[in-house]
Amino acid sequence: MTQFKGIVRPGGKLDQFNPYRIGLHLLLDRLRWDCSPRSWIHRKKVAALRNVHAGEKAIILCNGPSLRDVDFSTIRGVFTFGLNKINLLFKQTDFRPSAIVSVNPFVIEQNANFFSSTDILLFLDRVAINHGISSTEHIYFLHSCGFPYFARDCSVSVFQGFTVTYVALQIAYHMGFSNVALVGCDHDYKMTGNPNVIGYNESRDPAHFCEDYFSPNQPWQFPDLKASEYYYDLARRCYEDDGRVIVNASMKTQLSVFPLMRLEDFIRDA
């Protein structure tokens, strides 16, 4: 995940802030992508999804351990976004999400074989192209911008906001969903390390629904929970400004940014 020091991390030091350097980096990155025919093809594809689910509800399946306790039979018929390596859940259930979102380069590289073979709707950061994932009808490549904002229109760029869940919230908004629930968003990591630094698990992975989510030989980045909360709050405010709602329907969670709601109540009443 590429972020800019002094501009995107809330509370970060601003003594290294150089608007010209950052602006030039953003411009060159944008131009490199726009010079590719894929950019215009996928921008048009993503734009075509604008408000196609206006007024509907959606569920974002996050990857915390509590996801193991979800009764997936209760959410059939509701549009669901799976995240990253949600496919590791497939050996335990015949449930399949409506779409999968993945933007972290490590995760995309590690899960490239699945992304290349599934017919599930995929929203992937354009870095996936570097890992042999080809354009198909059901794949939508996204451009990740380093400027900190909430993308109401994802056809140009999204901001990663230190968590793939934030990207999924932007896509859900773009597609018109008015009521969105987070499930499995435990927001509680037992491992300690400096935010965004690359690390390796020493044994089994206790932070995700599958103990093999990140095996000992696979790199991953330590979460930045405070930065995630900052951008979660931005997402909440953007939704509320448009009369929409995000709730946290996770069974076990340390995230207090969104109002809590039982999943069964969200499915029945929202």
Image (cartoon, rainbow, N blue to C red):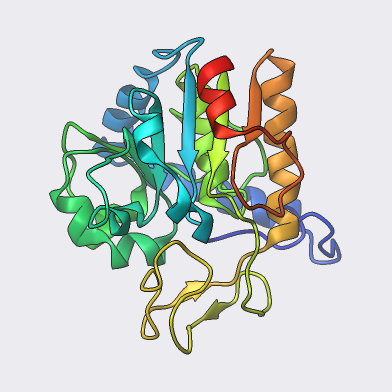
Q: Nearer the viewer, residue 246 or 19?
A: 246
Tell me, yes or no, if residue 85 can be seen here. Answer: yes
Residue 97 in the image, given as x and y percentages of width and height: 32, 38
Q: Residue furthest top?
A: 55
**Which residue is depicted at the point 17% across and 48% down?**
134
Q: Nearer the viewer, residue 157 or 177?
A: 177
Q: Residue furthest bottom?
A: 202
Residue 222 in the image, given as x and y percentages of width and height: 59, 72
In this rendering, the count of numbered labels is 0
> Left or right of 233: which side holds 146?
left
Q: Nearer the viewer, residue 95 or 231?
A: 95
Q: Residue furthest left?
A: 117
Residue 192 in the image, given as x and y percentages of width and height: 66, 79
**Which residue is depicted at the point 73% across and 49% down?**
229
Tell me: residue 127, above or below residue 169: below
Tell me: residue 83, above or below residue 150: below
**Which residue is depicted at the point 60% across and 51% down?**
24
Residue 128 in the image, given as x and y percentages of width and height: 30, 54
Quarter holding the C terminus?
top right
Tell me, yes or no, if residue 20 can be seen here. Answer: no
Tell me: residue 236, above or below residue 257: above
**Which residue is depicted at the point 75% across and 28% down?**
237
Q: Nearer the viewer, residue 260 or 174?
A: 260
Q: Quadrant of residue 246?
A: top right
